[in-house]
Image (tube, grey):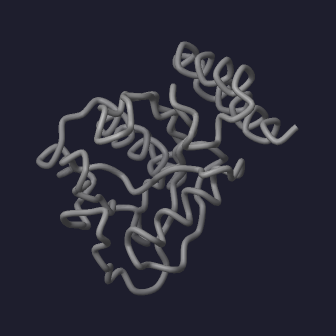
Amino acid sequence: MHRQFLLDQLSEYSQRHPLESETTNAFVEFVKSQPECFERSLAMGHITGSAWVVNADGSEVLLTHHRKLDRWLQLGGHADGDCDTLSVAIKEAEEESGLRDFTPLGSGIFDLDIHPIPARKNDPGHLHYDVRYVLRANGSLSFTVSEESHDLCWIAIDQVSTLTSESSMMRMVDKWRNLRFKSAGMPSP
């Protein structure tokens, strides 16, 4: 079953984040009930993969000012049939930033989000079931802005709120702070 890999990751995520059971359960139901969940052509919604890209010490995150949505967001995009959402997140991070060397951090999925995408041209409004991972950028941090973005910027974790107040973005800020402190053996802020 091409969906089992993601279902296994979702099961592990639900154990680490029991307070997010409503979102996790909605993901599981969607993946189980929609054999074409990784295809952009599924009009009701589809799986996407995103990357919370951090610098070497984790003090900054790379955000994109998304051209179509006109908002500051993490890098990411459509799975287009690929059921390995981590690979999707890495591919999208490469395409949208020009960076080429990433190391996945943490244990599996970092965050889940289900959000509406407004109708545009011939595409009806639909949902993105976004699977998010932390990637550390290695080597040069000089990025290239792709046609999908107005801009990109490295921003200090504590300054993300100057660009966006979206709840899913602020949730990732909080999760990243906690993960950084735990991995450094320090108490959470």
- Percent position of residue 21, x then y: 58, 15
Could one spot residue 60 in this view of the protein?
no
Q: Residue at x 64, y 22 (%)?
A: 30
- Percent position of residue 110, x then y: 54, 43
Q: Is residue 109 left or right of residue 78?
A: right
Relative height, residue 30 to residue 122 (above, below): above
Outermost residue, right side: 1
Outermost residue, front side: 122
Q: Residue at x 60, y 52 (%)?
A: 80
Could one spot residue 8 in this view of the protein?
yes
Outermost residue, bottom side: 140
In the picture, the quarter occupied by the C terminus is top left
139 vs 82, nearest the viewer: 82
Quadrant housing residue 69: top left
- Percent position of residue 83, x then y: 71, 48
- Percent position of residue 142, x then y: 32, 83
In the picture, the quarter occupied by the N terminus is top right
Relative height, residue 109 to residue 93 (above, below): above
Q: Residue at x 45, y 51 (%)?
A: 180
Q: Is residue 93 left or right of residue 65?
A: right
